[in-house]
Image: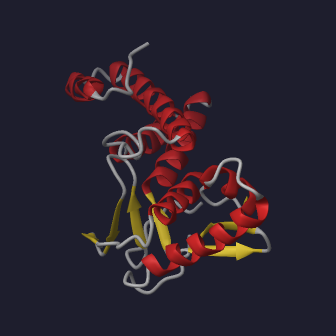
Amino acid sequence: MKTTHNPEKIFIRTFGGLTIYRHHAPVAISWESQKARLLFCYLLITSDQWVHRDQLLELLWPGCEHESGSKNFKTTLSRLRKSFQGARNLNPVLTQGDAYRLNFEAIACDNGVFRDNAVAGIKHMTRNEVKSAREHLEKAQELYVAEFLPEEPTDAFIGASRQELAGLFTTVLNYLERIYAAEERTDLLASLRSLSHFPSFQRN
């Protein structure tokens, strides 16, 4: 996934709640159904991977018959696309046979940018490339302003992603703490440690 933010793109914020921006201003989305919104959230989680329709069917309608599920999915996908007609009239979902993913030519999302920077920062740290590590880790830390999609507390798929991102965030903070301590930056350490009020951050 590309981590650069094109201002012409729709930008999706997921940390602290689903919010959609264009030109740094919130865009109101009138979701055609709750299932359409959930489908969008699931595709945000799967990022730039193609996801087979059957996997999405099981997430949206667990245990449903394939024929009825396929009809429901077709309707839900249509409603999802219709929900975005007012936001630059873009098509948010691409199709390749029976597989689907978000249209990242038109959409950027904070959880993907966070993950890319966190993973890059951790890799640089393992190679002792501290300057590059710090740059990526700080970018990741700035994006994680609160938990991932907290408005969906009971959804198992979203919850698993929330837990995984929270763990990655904790690793980011621990590495930054190590870097700032080595640099004797007490100001940055104090600022970093003030983030411990996030429920997902439990110091090792």
**Residue 153 visible here:** yes
164 up-or-down from 60: above or below: above
Q: Position of residue 172 (x, y in %)?
A: 45, 32
Q: How many marks?
A: 0
105 up-or-down from 110: above or below: below
Q: Nearer the viewer, residue 42 or 10?
A: 42
Residue drawn where x is 43% and y is 76% of the image: 83
134 up-or-down from 203: above or below: below
Report whether 199 appears left or right of 123.
left
Residue drawn where x is 78% and y is 69% of the image: 98
Q: Position of residue 128 (x, y in %)?
A: 56, 29
Q: Nearer the viewer, residue 183 or 94?
A: 94
Q: Position of residue 11 (x, y in %)?
A: 40, 67
Quarter holding the C terminus? top left
How has the structure been colored for display?
A: secondary structure
Q: Position of residue 131 (x, y in %)?
A: 45, 38
Residue drawn where x is 41% and y is 39% of the image: 153
Quarter holding the N terminus? bottom right
Q: Nearer the viewer, residue 197 or 159?
A: 159
Residue drawn where x is 30% and y is 29% of the image: 198
**Residue 103 visible here:** no
The residue positioned farthest toward the top in the image shown: 204
Please tell me in which quadrant of the rendered image residue 129 appears.
Answer: top right
